[in-house]
Every structure is written in C-alpha cells, then in structure tokens.
Amino acid sequence: MKIICVGRNYFDHINELKNEKQDSPVLFLKPETSIIQKKQPFFIPDFSNDIQYEVEVLIKINRLGKAISPKFSHKYYNEIGLGIDFTARDLQNKLKKDSLPWEKSKSFDGSALIGNWINKKNIDDINNLEFRLTKNGDIVQKGNTSKMLWDIDELISEISNFFTLKIGDIIFTGTPSGVGRVVENDNLVGYINNNECFSIKIK
Ligand code: ZN
C-alpha cells in the first residue's frame, strides 16, 4: 500500500506557512514504513529539532482506480479517519530552500499516524466534517472539510491521474492552520465531531 498526502489544501494553513496557492493540489507520498504501529508512541528522531503535528482527515481506498472522474470518486472509499502527518519542519524548510524533494522531512519512519476508521454511512456530510486536535488537553488545531480548496471527490480524481489507486491506499487530505511543535511527553488526541480517533504520546 501507499500513502498519498495532499499539501496546501486549506487557505489558513497556506497563509500560516507563507506558501502560494497552487493550480492543482501539491502531492507527495509516504511509504508503508512511515506508519506508526497501533498503540506505539511517536519517537522524536535525532535529525530534527522541530517536529510538528499536522492533523488531517484520511480516506481509505477500497477499489482499484485510475483517472477517476470526480462524480465517481465516492465509489472508491467506504471509510474515513483522522491522522497526523508528522513533519520535520526544520529539515523541510531547508529542503524547500534548496529546491529539493521533501521526503526526508515528511516520509521518515513513524511520520504517519493513522487513527480509527469510521464508516461513511455514519457520517451525515463528508464535506462538512468537523475535526480537531488537542495537545495536553488544549485544542491546537480545528478544521472543517468544507474549508478544503479541493474537496474529497476532487482529490481522489486528481490523485488518480498521477497514481493508480489500489485497495488499502490511504489519502491524507491536508492540514488546517495551527500546526506546531511537539516535545517529549506531549499527548496528542484527535477527534472527528466528538469521536476520539486516536491518542498518542510523544517520546
Ligand atoms: Zn500534511
């Protein structure tokens, strides 16, 4: 399986990092080895002094597809979730400055937290879904899928023009504003509406 991540999908986060809005979504991949195993903590790697959380809505692909039309995108997933795209921001800024690919800062071991899945039948409107992240009990990120620049159907379509989607692939749909640094012993909890999707300790 593979993880396809979307960058710069919320205006407020684009402004926060002083990025430009793109004509099509920014995409990058995380390998299977980036996934944090269930119940495991996040271990801060030696190569960064600025690991940041990015809470994101996730889509799990349930059938094979390529060049999917947006009107058929809804047939390609049954489950949605919430996760964290852990980012070594100091390293990413250096790579960006040198016009180099982001992988070392975004796709390292343990950079993908995947929470529990929710069947989309249990969700009223996938395009108006509230989610939030707390750090040590305080809300640090709050988002709503209605604020995405490219909605879920458009993302699935756009991604499938570049990467054939396979069963089990996961899409990270981008983060809203409020990204920030973690330190040892922080505890991060993510919610969709009021359902807890994950809880993770930083080590
Ligand atoms: Zn992200």
Image (cartoon, rainbow, N blue to C red):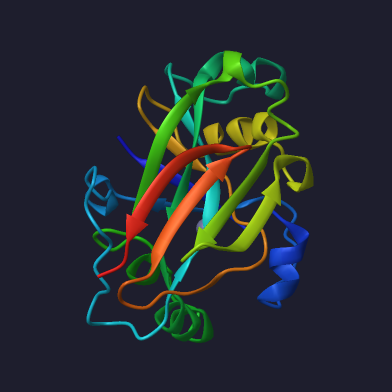
Residue at the image position 72 percent from the left and 56 percent from the top: 10
Q: Quadrant of the C terminus?
A: bottom left
- Residue at image point 29% right, 49% down: 31
Question: With respect to residue 25, does 19 lie above or below?
Answer: below
Image: 82 above or below 34: above
Q: Tell me the quarter of the picture where residue 142 sits.
A: bottom right
Residue 24 higher or lower than 111, as above or below = above
Residue 61 place in picture, x, y as percent: 45, 25
Residue at the location (65% across, 33% down)? 152
How far across and down, in percent of the image, does residue 44 sit? 27, 73
Classify residue 69 as left or right of residue 195: right
Residue 137: x and y in percent read: 51, 62
The answer to whether residue 81 is left or right of residue 23 is left
Side of 202 relative to 144 (left or right): left
> In the rendered image of this protein, does residue 99 appear above or below residue 128?
below
Q: Nearer the viewer, residue 154 or 180?
A: 180
Foreground pick, 182 / 106: 182
Q: Which quadrant is home to the N terminus?
A: top left
Q: How many marks?
A: 0
Q: Is residue 119 left or right of residue 104?
A: right
Q: Position of residue 16 (x, y in %)?
A: 70, 74
Residue closest to the eye, 136 or 116: 136
Residue at (34, 55) in percent of width and height = 200
Res. 73 image quadrant = top right
